[in-house]
């Protein structure tokens, strides 16, 4: 009979494959973006993602298990969809919004997966694994928050043609933001995705 540990190891192998695929995909996402802040955020997350691969290997080792990957069909599909969006919107004012949308879909899959893995590691009484998975989860949440901030600050308005492309919104001539353009609140970004 299959156990929680079996489920944990299967899902961990799934995420090991996912992270390796994401490491390969992020440079292309950065290249597709035209916003320098977005490019920088993606390349920063690339470094984190490379670290996630290493941390997952450490989690396997903490269970005295051989490191293995199982094809992550969800990530394969999300990355293919992201490639299609980038190709479809290349040269469009909506390209950065498209890249953010694709990246956030991947982030949300990762957050859900690492949330489960972290909880299961705790139930399996492996504090080392739980700690490593919590670190990964926090970085995924941080990456998603960064993408939210970029979407709200510039990319969504750019997609509507209401940004001048350098990260500041256009005004209506009287110093007021054009209708439909909301300023981003100072502080923490909303918890929900608003990139689409």
Image (cartoon, rainbow, N blue to C red):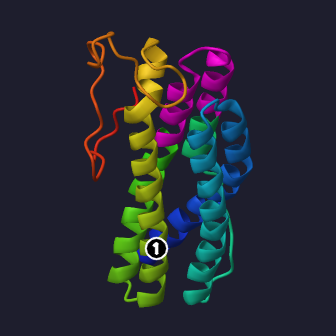
State whether residue 35 is above or below residue 76: above
Could you say whether the residue bearing mark 1 is in a helix, strand or loop? helix
- Quarter in which the C terminus is drawn: top left
Residue that appears at 30% across and 47% down: 189
- Quarter in which the N terminus is drawn: bottom left
Q: Position of residue 185 (x, y in %)?
A: 25, 42
Residue that appears at 29% across and 18% down: 175
Question: In this picture, which residue range is highlighted in magenta?
Answer: 80-104
In-image side of 53 versus 139 (left or right) = right
Residue identified by numbered label 1: 135
Q: Position of residue 147 (x, y in %)?
A: 46, 43
Q: Position of residue 19 (x, y in %)?
A: 63, 58
**Residue 1 in view (yes/no):** no
Q: Front-most of 70 and 40?
A: 40
Is residue 82 covered in magenta?
yes
Is residue 112 covered in magenta?
no
In-image side of 84 versus 94 (left or right) = right
Q: Front-most of 174 and 94?
A: 174
Mark 1: few/some/many CA within 10 Å (<14, 14-19, 20+):
some
- In which quarter of the view is residue 168 placed? top left
Q: Point out the residue furthest to the front here.
A: 174
């Amino acid at each position: 009979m299959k156990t929680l540990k079996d489920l944990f190891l299967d899902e961990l192998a799934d995420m090991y494959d996912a992270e390796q695929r994401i490491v390969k995909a992020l440079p292309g996402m950065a290249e597709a973006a035209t916003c320098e802040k977005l490019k920088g955020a993606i390349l920063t997350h690339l470094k984190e993602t490379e670290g996630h691969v290493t941390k997952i290997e450490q989690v396997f080792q903490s269970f005295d298990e051989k490191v293995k990957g199982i094809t992550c069909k969800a990530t394969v599909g999300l990355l293919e969809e992201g490639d299609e969006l980038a190709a479809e919107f290349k040269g469009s004012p909506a390209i950065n919004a498209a890249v953010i949308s694709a990246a956030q879909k991947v982030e949300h899959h990762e957050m859900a997966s690492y949330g489960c893995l972290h909880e299961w590691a705790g139930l399996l009484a492996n504090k080392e694994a739980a700690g490593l998975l919590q670190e990964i989860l926090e970085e995924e949440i941080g990456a998603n928050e960064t993408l939210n901030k970029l979407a709200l600050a510039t990319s969504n308005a750019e997609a509507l043609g209401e940004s001048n492309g350098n990260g500041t919104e256009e005004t209506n001539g009287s110093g007021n933001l054009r209708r439909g353009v909301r300023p981003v609140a100072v502080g923490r970004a909303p918890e929900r995705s608003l990139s689409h």
